[in-house]
């Protein structure tokens, strides 16, 4: 029993820590980046990836014979053959790996140094494009515009254009794109600690609207940490008197029930409490009372009293996706971020491949691929490539492109960079 109490406390601390990190990130002020010092690679973070990096130690391992004007035509309309010749520049691949591992500042300093030293010949413009992409992804418009001035002065051509976040709508974005629709969140197949990012978005939406939509139609599994995080979020929305549209909530209750067993005390009560919270929101009094008795028996406590929700709760069934939503002519749309386990993503790509002669993976919305996830993605695509099906990554940002090149994805798929317009 003592061991289980320790496990329960550890789980609660984990939930607390995840929420603390979210609140700290939300409260962190956004300040203009410092101007590069004389030593642009001076470190403030210890033990960073390749912390002994010095830009002059690296030289391009290939000869680039294409004229700079061709590389720069149409802003960043680099031809595929030009990219293929520059894809093995070690320093650019290392910067991409740093970005993929979350070491954003080190990647930024490295690219800034490459640009300042200007010693990669015709590959140097690609470092500019990578840095433009980094600032765009980080929503650092101040640095982006400063870099634009430098770019225009050096190459005497128009720089890439800053894109406001509302200009790019993700077809799989969890917030509702239609301005007339209720803003909200579509939860992923796994309800675990990773939902903290969605809950942060939900918190932001809660400041803009008193009505929110929570869609649980995709949820296939839950764990105690995810239940604890969602429980706290829902309780906060109740306190703030937000009206809720609950989509496929009974699917979520079924997934929670799958991990519960009467009489078995798990590491936290969170799944039980979340289940009862949702049953109250759905005004399923009889189901709530049955669950509360099971909870009482399991944890040897008094059963909680049923409280009908004070805020307005509307239920809805999950809408069937429009036919071929992700299988349009533009291809299968990759998510904004690829991280953690990629089994579900790979499976969706394989399903797409069954009905298409060419597997087009549209990366218009893709901002970052985690280093470990890129290896999993490669392993998942190798069998598909072995079947002779052409695979194309289109509209790839330059950071992801060089990560893919470094990881060997270029050996199983064509990687086509996006155009800055």
Image (spheres, helix red, strand yellow):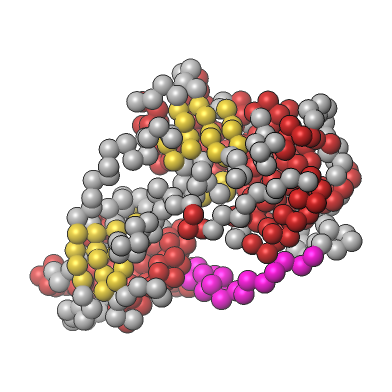
Q: Is residue 152 visible?
A: yes
Left-right relation of 389 to 183:
right
Picture layout, residue 269 above or below residue 175: below
Measuring from the top left, give residue 333's x and y in whole percent. Answer: 44, 41
| Residue lying at 44% horizontally and 52% vertically, measured from the top left | 169
Picture layout, residue 99 above or below residue 77: below
Measuring from the top left, give residue 321's x and y in whole percent. Answer: 27, 44
In front of the other: 357 or 235: 357
In front of the other: 286 or 322: 322
In front of the other: 302 or 25: 25
Picture layout, residue 379 above or below residue 180: above
Q: Quadrant of the N terminus?
A: bottom left
Which residue extends farthest left? 286
Q: Quadrant of the C terminus?
A: top right
Q: Which residues are magenta?
A: 18-35
| Residue lying at 23% horizontally and 57% vertically, measured from the top left | 248
Asked which quadrant contains residue 263, the reply is bottom left
| Residue lying at 61% horizontally and 25% vertically, measured from the top left | 411
Measuring from the top left, give residue 204's x and y in whole percent. Answer: 44, 70
Asked which quadrant contains residue 293, the reply is bottom left
Asked which quadrant contains residue 64, the reply is top right
């Amino acid at each position: 029993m003592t061991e289980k109490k320790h496990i329960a406390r550890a789980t609660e601390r984990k939930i607390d820590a995840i929420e603390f990190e979210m609140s700290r990130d939300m409260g962190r002020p956004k300040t203009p980046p410092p101007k590069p010092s004389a030593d642009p690679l001076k470190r403030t973070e210890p033990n960073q990836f390749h912390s002994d990096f010095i830009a002059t130690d690296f030289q391009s391992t290939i000869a680039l014979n294409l004229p700079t004007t061709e590389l720069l035509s149409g802003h960043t309309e680099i031809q595929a053959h030009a990219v293929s010749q520059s894809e093995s520049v070690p320093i650019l691949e290392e910067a991409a790996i740093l970005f993929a591992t979350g070491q954003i500042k080190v990647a930024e300093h490295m690219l800034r140094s490459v640009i300042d030293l200007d010693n990669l010949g015709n590959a140097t413009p690609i470092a500019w494009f990578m840095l433009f992409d980094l600032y765009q992804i980080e929503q650092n418009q101040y640095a982006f515009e400063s870099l634009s001035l430098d770019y225009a002065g050096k190459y005497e051509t128009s720089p890439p254009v800053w894109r406001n976040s509302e200009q790019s709508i993700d077809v799989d974005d969890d917030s509702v794109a239609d301005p007339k629709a209720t803003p909200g969140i579509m939860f992923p197949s796994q309800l675990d600690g990773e939902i903290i990012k969605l809950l942060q978005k939900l918190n932001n939406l809660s400041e803009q609207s008193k009505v929110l939509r929570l869609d649980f139609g995709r949820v296939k599994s839950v764990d105690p940490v995810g239940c604890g995080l969602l429980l706290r979020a829902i309780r906060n929305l109740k306190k703030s008197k937000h009206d809720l549209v609950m989509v496929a909530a009974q699917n979520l209750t079924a997934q929670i029930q799958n991990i519960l067993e009467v009489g078995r005390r798990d590491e936290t009560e969170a799944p039980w409490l979340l289940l009862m919270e949702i049953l109250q929101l759905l005004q399923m009094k009889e189901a709530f009372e049955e669950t509360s008795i099971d909870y009482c028996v399991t944890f040897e406590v008094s059963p909680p009293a049923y409280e009908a929700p004070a805020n307005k709760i509307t239920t809805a069934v999950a809408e069937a996706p429009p036919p071929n939503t992700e299988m349009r002519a533009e291809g299968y749309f990759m998510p904004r971020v690829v991280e953690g386990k990629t089994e579900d993503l790979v499976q969706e790509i394989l399903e797409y491949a069954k009905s298409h002669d060419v597997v087009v993976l549209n990366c218009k919305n893709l901002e970052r691929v985690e280093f470990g996830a890129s290896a999993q993605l490669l392993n998942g695509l190798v069998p598909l490539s072995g079947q002779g099906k052409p695979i194309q990554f289109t509209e790839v940002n330059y950071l992801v492109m060089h990560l893919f090149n470094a990881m060997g994805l270029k050996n199983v798929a064509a990687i086509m960079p996006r155009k800055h317009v």
